[in-house]
Image (cartoon, grey):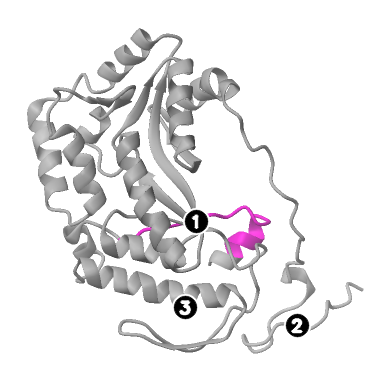
């Protein structure tokens, strides 16, 4: 599926690997593994997956995954496959990232906490002879002035009652995700002291799992906070807002002009999709040359 999407998108595909952090939800998907076992599966899966993306034919016998003669007939457009993104704050997650991931992601924690986490990941990757890129997942509430932005943030959670917050926090508490525990610790389930760092607001995390913080402020303030994360080595910013479309327009108009952006992508060599030019032979072999169109 990954190679198909990569070919259809002409090499624009990025993949975010998610191991899962809610045991109740996992059981609904038929997964009854504990935290460490899930990361064992993730590691084994990526062992096989990465070799397939490199064009290998794979025999593999792990504790959880066993394949014989696995291969991908139609290779991805991007060399070695689409870049892999991955986030996780536990020791097991950091080990997987250091060994197998291209871009390590963190949720929006205060800069000093992000710095500590990235330092650990960087050292683990270095020990394996690898160098990763780093990204951060944040919401954005940007307005012409700081006062307007803060008012918009308060309006966003203005209709939440304490019972709704308590119900959400109860669900988060059952999770075995270290990252979710770190998010919940930022606000402690309370509306008090939601600004946990300059212009970093934890109000979304009162009821939203996962990424629960937002940069709130004027364009100049939000840009400065982003530059602080850039100074830590963060090069990928995955941003969103509520409502999505309206906030995307505000970010584009107010914030992006203040930031240096990497524009465009490198042109990649295109491969011919075999669709109208031939078919796999017995579902096992790819045609060696393009069939005549006549």
Q: Position of residue 120 (x, y in %)?
A: 35, 54
Bounds of the magenta segment: 4-19
Vertical order, 150 against 66 (above or below): above
Q: Quadrant of residue 166?
A: top left
| In this view, the mark in front (1 or 3) | 1
Q: Is residue 263 left or right of residue 198?
A: right
Q: Secondary structure at mark 3?
A: helix
Mark 1 or mark 3: name the one nearer the start of the chain. Answer: 3
Write down the residue under mark 3.
48
Q: Residue at x 21, y 56 (%)?
A: 22
Tell me if label 1 and label 2 are in contact, CB under 8 Å. Answer: no
Residue 9 located within the stretch drawn in magenta: yes
Measured Cα–Cα span from mark 1 to mark 3:
20 Å
Q: Position of residue 217 (x, y in %)?
A: 39, 17
Estimate how packed mark 2 is, as few (under 14), some (14 to 19) or many (20 or more) residues with alpha carbons within 10 Å: some
Vertical order, 203 against 62 (above or below): above
Write down the residue under mark 1.
132
Q: Residue at x 19, y 71 (%)?
A: 32
Q: Residue at x 44, y 40 (%)?
A: 232
Q: Quadrant of residue 125?
A: bottom left
Mark 1 or mark 2: name the one nearer the start of the chain. Answer: 1
Vertical order, 129 against 137 (above or below): below
Q: Is residue 145 left or right of residue 35?
A: right
Q: Quadrant of the C terminus?
A: bottom right
| In this view, the mark in front (3 or 2) | 3
Write down the residue under mark 2.
287
Closer to us: 134 or 149: 134
Estimate how packed mark 3 is, as few (under 14), some (14 to 19) or many (20 or more) residues with alpha carbons within 10 Å: many
């Amino acid at each position: 599926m990954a190679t198909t999407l990569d070919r259809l998108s002409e090499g624009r595909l990025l993949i975010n690997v998610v191991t899962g952090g809610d045991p109740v939800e996992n059981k609904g998907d038929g997964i009854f593994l504990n935290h460490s076992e899930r990361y064992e599966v993730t590691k084994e899966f990526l062992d096989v997956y990465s070799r397939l993306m490199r064009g290998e034919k794979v025999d593999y016998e792990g504790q959880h995954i066993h394949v014989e003669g696995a291969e991908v007939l139609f290779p991805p457009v991007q060399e070695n496959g689409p870049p892999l993104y991955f986030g996780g704050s536990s020791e097991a997650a950091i080990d997987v990232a250091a060994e197998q991931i291209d871009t390590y992601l963190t949720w929006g924690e205060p800069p000093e906490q992000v710095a500590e986490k990235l330092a650990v990941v960087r050292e683990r990757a270095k020990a394996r002879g690898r160098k990763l890129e780093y990204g951060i997942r944040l919401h954005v509430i940007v307005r012409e002035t700081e006062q307007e932005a803060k008012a918009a943030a308060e309006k966003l959670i203005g209709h939440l009652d304490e019972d709704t917050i308590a119900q959400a926090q109860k669900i988060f508490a059952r999770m075995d995700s270290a990252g979710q525990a770190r998010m919940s610790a930022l606000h402690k389930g309370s509306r008090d002291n939601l600004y946990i760092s300059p212009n970093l607001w934890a109000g979304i995390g009162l009821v939203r799992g996962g990424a629960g913080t937002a940069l709130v402020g004027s364009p100049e303030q939000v840009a400065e906070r982003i530059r602080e994360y850039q100074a830590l080595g963060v090069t990928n910013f995955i941003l969103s807002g509520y409502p999505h479309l309206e906030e995307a327009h505000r970010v584009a108009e107010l914030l992006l002009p203040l930031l240096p952006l990497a524009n465009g992508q490198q042109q990649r060599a295109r491969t011919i999709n075999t669709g109208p030019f031939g078919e796999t032979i017995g579902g096992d072999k790819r045609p060696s040359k393009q069939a005549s169109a006549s």
